[in-house]
Image: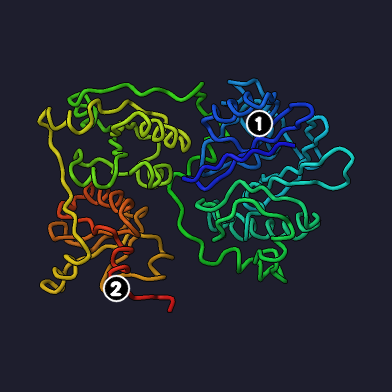
Amino acid sequence: MIIKPFVDEGLGNSSYLVASEITGRAVVIDPERDVDRYIQVAHGLGLQLTHALETHLHADFVSGLRELAEQSGVKIGASAEAQLAFGYLPLREGDAIHLGDLTLGVVATPGHTPEHISFTLTEAGRPTPSAIFTGGALIVGGAARTDLFGHHLTEPLTHLLYHTIHDKLLHLPDEVAVYPTHGAGSFCNASASGERVTTMGNERKGNPLVQARTEQEFLNRALNDLPSYPTYFAYLRAVNQLRTNVLHGIPLLSPLRAHDVHAQRSHGVAIVDARSPLQFTQGHIPNAYGIPVDTPLISWAGWVIPFNAPLILIADDPSTREQAVRQLLRIGYDDLRGYLDGGMRAWAKADLPITHVPVMSVQELVRAREMNDGLAVLDVRQDAEWRAGHLPGATHTEGGRLRTAELSFPKEEPLIVHCGHTARSTVAISVLEQRGYQNVKLLDGGFSAWEKAGYPIIRDDA
């Protein structure tokens, strides 16, 4: 058998090309939208793609099911309970997809979502599966979260997840390989593990949800200390259930002159500056979103930019632009109007307004605080990072919540912003600028630089 993972580090997810070496038949499980990767690898290995399969309706990325069907003629397979609004093979427990000497069996595994299914992979002549593709029903060290549907459904889904794991998945032998979709870095992930593939035996030994002795203990562990998640999650389940736009490949953005960008900006088009934090601080278009492509853009755009907003990119080289386009399309931002031709040099040459962000070192912050005890410091890291350690006297608001959070800082007073290092700070600063905070500075190196310099740290979990 062939099992080829495709890992999206930005989303923290894996999709899989699964094939028989004997027959050459192949499927893709949980494909993302830019499907050229799967097609190229399958072609290079001499494989025939027959199916695109989905474990559940995803909230964190736009499915590539229809894209693969249009580009490669594959059959779409998904849970019958997903009730997709386009033609597909509705799968139920006990159904099977045959690749010759390999069989993919369907198991109903609700919990992370109501319609969730998993796929066992069994070789001809063997009584038990060799592997199972679990989506979010079982991941390394945990399971995917059950709170994405609102408070009223969280506990019922968690009870379903308990029975999925304890009444179904735990009947599989220790040696069965487990290939989850959600993994390290995914906001659907309720586990802290950095591993992406596991076995049933490893999960019996080390997964707190597997080891829960009662259903109530499982419930407590599954719902304890869940982090926040990006706002675009509220839209993509419906997008994937209905009819997503078929792209027929990755679009090439049109170059736009500076004055054209300025005109579109005044008509509500959002500017996404995907350059480095240093470049953003040295000069950017007023009210642009400063989200470096490696932040990653894929999560933070979906957190702070209104869903479906028309976008123009600021990115200096074609490689960065392509990365940015792929990331934006994967989470449903389809209205890409083009990019600023010539970058910020062209903008400056056109004598259009530019905003600069002062950068302050941790040493300068200490000296400034000694002279001004009221100097405001805003920590925009995640809640867990804040609890693990933060600057004395700092205020905390997660960067993803800044668009709507109540802020007590005077808009005319200096405000020092920091994250763990630097990249998320520019995201936060750009949102603050849009809210009217024009005296914002970036703390160079963030909390890491403060900690490395040996300055005092407050630890809430000490």
Q: Earlier in the sequence, mark 2 or mark 1?
A: 1
User: Do residues under tags 2 and 1 come within 8 Å of each other at their CB atoms?
Assistant: no
In the rendering, at what x and y percent does residue 226 appear?
A: 51, 62
Most foreground residue, 426 or 319: 319
Q: Amino acid at mark 1?
A: Ala
The 10 Å Cα crowd at callout 1, few under 14, some 14 to 19, many 20 or more, is many
Q: Nearer the viewer, mark 2 or mark 1?
A: 2
Q: Which residue is mark 1?
A: 52
Local SS, label 1: strand
Q: Is residue 73 above or below residue 353?
A: above
In the rendering, at what x and y percent does residue 288 appear?
A: 25, 40
Q: Is residue 89 above or below residue 442?
A: above
**Residue beneath the point at 57% across and 42% down:** 58
In the rendering, at what x and y percent does residue 106 appear?
A: 76, 41
**Residue beneath the point at 51% across and 66% down:** 225
Image quadrant in which you'd find residue 240: top right
Q: Image check: 184 left or right of 214? A: left
Local SS, label 2: loop
The 10 Å Cα crowd at callout 2, few under 14, some 14 to 19, many 20 or more, is few
Q: Quadrant of the N terminus?
A: top right
Q: Image check: 132 left or right of 306? A: right
**Residue beneath the point at 17% across and 28% down:** 346
In the rendering, at what x and y percent does residue 175 appear?
A: 78, 54
In the orientation shown, which residue stands out farthest toward the bottom? 462
Q: Which residue is mark 2?
A: 454
Q: Quadrant of the C terminus?
A: bottom left
